[in-house]
Each structure stands twice: as C-alpha cells, then as structure tokens.
C-alpha cells in the first residue's frame, strides 16, 4: 500500500490523494507517464518530482523516512514493504499499578522465531537482540511497553513503531488487546481467562515458591500476547484496505501460528485461581494472600 500512497508528500492530504486515485494515478509509477489533466491538478508536478526521493528511500529500506512523513493513522500502510524487518513485542511486569518497577519477561516474535527474555536469566540479552529489527509492532507499546523498556534498561529504541492499539481503535475495536482479539474471533484456549493481573501472580508464584510451571505458564501467556500481534496486524491491515480502492489486489493472507516453546499448566492456573480469587477470575472477589 505504500507505493499507492501520496500523503507522505508535503502538502498532499487525503483529498488530494483521493483526487490522484480518481484520475488513475493509483501508484507512484503511474505518475511517470505523461500528465495531461484538465483542469490541471495543483501540485501534480511537485508530487511527481518528490516521488523520486520516495523511491530512493524505499530502495534504501529507510522506514523512518515514511514513518516521519505519513500521518500516524496511516502507518499501517508501510507494513508489507517492511514486514520482513519487523518484530512483534510484548512485556510483562511484576507490579499491579506500581509504575516503572520490574520487567519480568519480554517476548519477541519476528514471524518465524520466538525469543523469550526472563528476569534473572537472560533479560539483558534483549538490549542487543532488539537491534536486529528496524520496526516494532505492539499493542499499546507507545504508551506502556516502550517507555517502560527505555526507563528500565536506560536505553533509547529508535525503531519505527506501529502501535495496533491506535490502528484497531480507528476501526472501532477498543477495550484492550484481549477484547480486540475476542471481537475478531481469536480464542486463547487454556489462556483465555488469564490477563496481566494474573501474570503478576504467576511471577510471584515462581519467585516465592520456585514453581517452574508458573514461569512456563507466564511465558506461554506472554508469547500468546506477542504472536497474536501478527494476526491482528494483518487483520487490521486488510480492514483498513477496505477504506481504499485497493482491497482486492493488496489483501494479505492470515499467517499460520508457530509452535509455542512453553505451555500453560492448568494445575498452576487452578491453584492461583483458588488461592487469590476464591475459584473465580472475577477481580471483585480477589483477596490477596501472602
């Protein structure tokens, strides 16, 4: 969809772009043919000239050029061109509402490989590994995950970033990651009732009791959050395409799910449910027991 876009050109907004499409200029290369539009479309020659710069940056793989110039609500458009350089990211922390506290786990997924980073084991390896990617895709990462990571490690992440919270909200899907998944027909199986609050309890069980199954369940949950981002990204991209004239030709197939290296342990889930929720995953009956 990037090569069909003109709104990264200074002075070109949605109306001008729509006018270009209606005149048959559906992609960058179409403006290379002789232009004979009556009445003349303002800025047409300017757009034509500046597209040489766009092509150069695309050939160089310069994602930031397009991220900086496209309106934020159109960042989904450059997903296919840079998909092979993207990573899906999600973190878990050890606090309920404790602000910048401790990262317990991070998962990265690049569409093929799943990498897990655990506090007290290999968490610092994340700092080097994230440098292998030029684009981050998250849910609410701009407000939470990325600032938390940057503060915790005292680093700055310079990758381009597509935050699916805002893409999906623009499509009418709100209420959090799992609410969006549910609205789009995605089912988490054994992890359906687990949320970030429960993930904190899994980490506490692992740290206080040495329960390895609690850690594996936490990682399975974190991986599910991360892997599902790819399917949500593709789904959102296809839905956004419906707002354009390119839906039929640009649509992307949904990806297959990878094999997870960790599985949720139902006994651990039930134990925590009984101990902290009285057998129900309703926060209204939550009683914290030390």
Image (tube, rainbow, N blue to C red):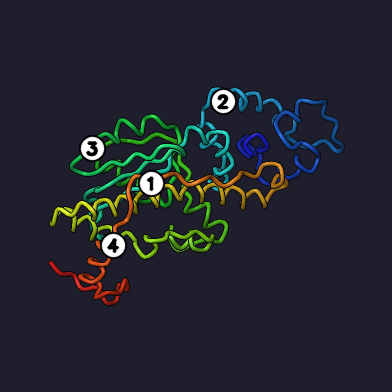
Q: Marks 1/3: CA distance?
A: 19 Å
Residue wearing tag 2: 57
Q: Say which quadrant the N terminus sits in.
A: top right
Residue wearing tag 3: 122
Closer to the chain start, of discs 4 and 3, is: 3
Do tag 2 and tag 4 residues touch (Cβ < 8 Å)?
Answer: no
Disc 1 vs disc 2: which is toward the camera? 1
Q: Marks 4/3: CA distance?
A: 23 Å
On residue 198, which mark appears? 4
Dot 3 falls on a residue whose secondary structure is loop
Disc 1 vs disc 3: which is toward the camera? 1
Q: Marks 2/3: CA distance?
A: 36 Å
Judge the density around disc 4: few (<14), some (14-19), many (≥20) Cα neighbours within 10 Å.
many
Question: Percent position (x, y) of residue 162?
Answer: 48, 44
Most foreground residue, 172 or 188: 188
Closer to the chain start, of discs 2 and 3, is: 2
Most foreground residue, 265 or 25: 265
Disc 2 vs disc 4: which is toward the camera? 4
Residue wearing tag 1: 260
């Amino acid at each position: 969809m990037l090569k069909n876009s003109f709104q990264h050109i200074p002075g070109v907004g949605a109306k001008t772009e729509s006018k270009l499409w209606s005149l048959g200029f559906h992609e960058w290369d179409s403006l290379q043919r002789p232009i004979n539009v009556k009445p003349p479309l303002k800025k047409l020659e300017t757009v034509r000239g500046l597209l040489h710069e766009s092509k150069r940056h695309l050939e160089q793989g310069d994602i930031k050029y397009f991220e900086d110039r496209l309106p934020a609500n159109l960042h989904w458009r450059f997903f296919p061109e840079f998909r092979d350089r993207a990573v899906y990211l999600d973190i878990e922390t050890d606090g309920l509402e404790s602000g910048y506290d401790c990262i317990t786990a991070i998962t990265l997924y690049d569409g093929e490989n799943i990498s897990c980073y655990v506090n007290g084991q290999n968490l610092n390896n994340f700092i080097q590994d994230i440098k292998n990617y030029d684009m981050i895709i998250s849910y609410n990462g701009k407000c939470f995950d990325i600032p938390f990571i940057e503060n915790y490690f005292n680093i700055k992440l310079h990758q381009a970033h597509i935050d699916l919270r805002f893409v999906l909200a623009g499509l009418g899907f709100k209420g959090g990651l799992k609410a969006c998944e549910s609205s789009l027909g995605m089912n988490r199986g054994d992890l359906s009732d687990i949320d970030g609050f429960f993930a904190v309890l899994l980490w506490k069980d692992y740290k206080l009791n040495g329960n390895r199954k609690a850690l594996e369940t936490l990682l399975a949950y974190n991986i599910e959050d991360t892997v599902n981002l790819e399917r949500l990204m593709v789904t959102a991209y296809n839905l956004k395409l419906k707002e354009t004239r390119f839906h039929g030709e640009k649509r992307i197939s949904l990806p297959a799910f990878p094999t997870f290296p960790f599985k949720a342990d139902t006994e651990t889930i039930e134990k925590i449910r009984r101990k902290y929720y009285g057998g129900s995953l309703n926060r209204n009956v939550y009683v914290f027991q030390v």
